[in-house]
C-alpha cells in the first residue's frame, strides 16, 4: 500500500497566525531572557536590587523639596506632596526604564537573533517585564510613605491594575518603535536618553497636572504619559484627586495608537533584523 506524499498547503494569513502561536511555544525563552536580564542588571553590585528603591526615592525627595517646598506648588487636596510625587514616579520610572531597556534589547541579543529562529517580539517584551520588576520593588516605597503619613487610600485603589495595564501598553508600544529604529539607525542609542530626560520635565511627575491652565490642558494631554500619571494619582490619592476626563481619553487613545503602531512597525521590520543587526 502506497502512502500519499505530504502536501504543502499555502494559505493566505497562515504565517501571521503561526507567529502568534509561536509566541506561546517559545514562552520558556521569554522567561529565560527576563530572568537573565534581572540577574545581570544587579550582578556585582554591593546593594543589589536596593538600587530599584534608592533611585526613585532620591528623585522623589528632590522633586518634593524643589516643587513642594521651594516653588510651593499645590498638591491635590490634602494629599502629602511626597505621595503625590511618588504616585507619578512609579509609572514614569517604569516607562523610562522600559524605553532604555527595549531600545538596546535587540542589539544586545544580536548573536541570538542572527543564529536562531524565534519570534523577535519576545526580546523587547521581556525587557519591559524586567522594568516591571523594578516597578513592583519601588511600590514598597509607596507603602512606606502611606504608613509614614498615615494615608489610607480609598476604594479607587482597586482600579490601579487598569492603569498599570495602560502603562504597560505605552511602554511596550514606545519600546517596540525604538527597538526597531535602533537596529536600523544606531543614532537612536543617543536619542533615547534625551527623550527620557526631556519627557521627565514635560510630564506631570514633580507637580500636579491641575496647575496647567484649562485652555492648554487638552493640548498638554497629547503627552500619553499625562493620562497614565493622572490615572495613577486618581487611583492612589482617592478623593483628593480629580481626573481631567477629555485629556485622559485623549492620552488613552494615543497610547492605543502607539501600542498598535509599535507592533505593526516591529513586525514590518522584523524580517530584516538578522540581516542588518
Image: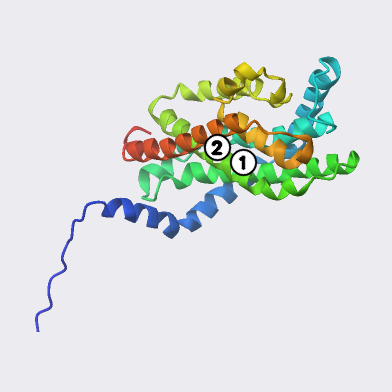
Q: Which is nearer the eye, 255 or 200?
A: 255
Labelled pair 1, 2 in contact (Cβ < 8 Å)? yes
Q: Residue 131 has which mark?
A: 1
Q: Quadrant of residue 263?
A: top left
| Residue sitting at x 47%, y 34% | 258
Residue 48 visible to the viewer = no
Residue 53 location (% of width, % of height): 76, 38
The image shows residue 254, relative to residue 129, as above or below, that is above
Q: Residue 171 has which mark?
A: 2
Q: Quadrant of residue 231?
A: top right
Give the side of residue 148 with respect to residue 143, left or right: right
Badge 2: few (under 14), some or many (20 or more) residues near its Cα, within 10 Å?
A: many
| Residue sitting at x 38%, y 34% | 277
Name the residue at the top extreme: 71
Q: Nearer the viewer, mark 1 or mark 2?
A: 2
Q: Which is nearer the eye, 188 or 249?
A: 249
Q: Quadrant of residue 43?
A: top right
Badge 1: few (under 14), some or many (20 or more) residues near its Cα, within 10 Å?
A: many
Badge 2 element: helix
Give the side of residue 217 with respect to residue 149, left or right: left
Residue 2 location (% of width, % of height): 9, 80
Q: Earlier in the sequence, mark 1 or mark 2?
A: 1
Give the side of residue 196 with respect to residue 183, left or right: right
Q: Which is nearer the eye, 115 or 27?
A: 27
Residue 136 location (% of width, % of height): 70, 46
Give the side of residue 3 with respect to residue 187, left or right: left
For the N terminus, the image quarter is: bottom left
Amino acid at each position: 500500500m502506497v502512502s500519499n506524499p505530504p502536501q504543502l498547503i499555502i494559505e493566505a494569513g497562515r504565517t501571521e497566525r503561526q507567529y502568534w502561536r509561536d509566541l506561546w511555544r517559545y514562552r520558556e525563552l521569554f522567561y529565560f531572557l527576563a530572568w537573565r536580564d534581572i540577574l545581570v542588571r544587579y550582578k556585582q553590585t554591593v546593594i543589589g536590587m536596593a538600587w530599584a528603591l534608592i533611585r526613585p526615592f532620591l528623585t522623589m525627595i528632590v522633586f518634593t523639596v524643589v516643587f513642594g517646598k521651594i516653588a510651593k506648588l499645590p498638591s491635590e487636596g490634602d494629599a502629602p506632596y511626597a505621595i503625590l510625587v511618588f504616585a507619578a514616579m512609579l509609572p514614569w520610572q517604569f516607562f523610562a526604564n522600559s524605553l532604555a531597556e527595549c531600545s538596546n534589547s535587540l542589539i544586545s541579543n544580536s548573536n541570538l537573533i542572527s543564529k536562531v529562529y524565534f519570534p523577535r517580539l519576545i526580546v523587547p517584551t521581556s525587557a519591559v517585564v524586567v522594568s516591571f520588576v523594578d516597578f513592583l520593588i519601588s511600590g514598597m516605597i509607596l507603602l512606606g510613605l502611606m504608613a509614614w503619613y498615615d494615608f489610607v487610600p480609598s476604594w479607587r485603589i482597586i482600579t490601579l491594575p487598569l492603569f498599570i495595564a495602560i502603562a504597560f501598553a505605552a511602554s511596550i508600544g514606545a519600546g517596540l518603535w525604538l527597538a526597531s529604529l535602533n537596529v536600523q539607525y544606531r543614532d537612536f542609542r543617543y536619542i533615547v536618553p534625551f527623550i527620557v530626560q526631556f519627557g521627565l520635565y514635560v510630564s506631570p511627575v514633580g507637580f500636579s497636572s491641575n496647575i496647567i491652565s484649562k485652555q492648554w490642558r487638552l493640548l498638554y494631554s497629547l503627552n500619553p504619559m499625562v493620562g497614565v500619571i493622572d490615572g495613577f494619582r486618581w487611583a492612589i490619592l482617592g478623593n483628593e484627586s480629580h481626573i481631567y476626563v477629555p485629556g485622559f481619553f485623549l492620552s488613552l487613545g494615543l497610547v492605543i495608537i502607539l501600542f498598535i503602531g509599535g507592533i505593526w512597525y516591529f513586525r514590518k521590520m522584523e524580517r530584516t533584523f538578522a540581516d542588518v543587526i
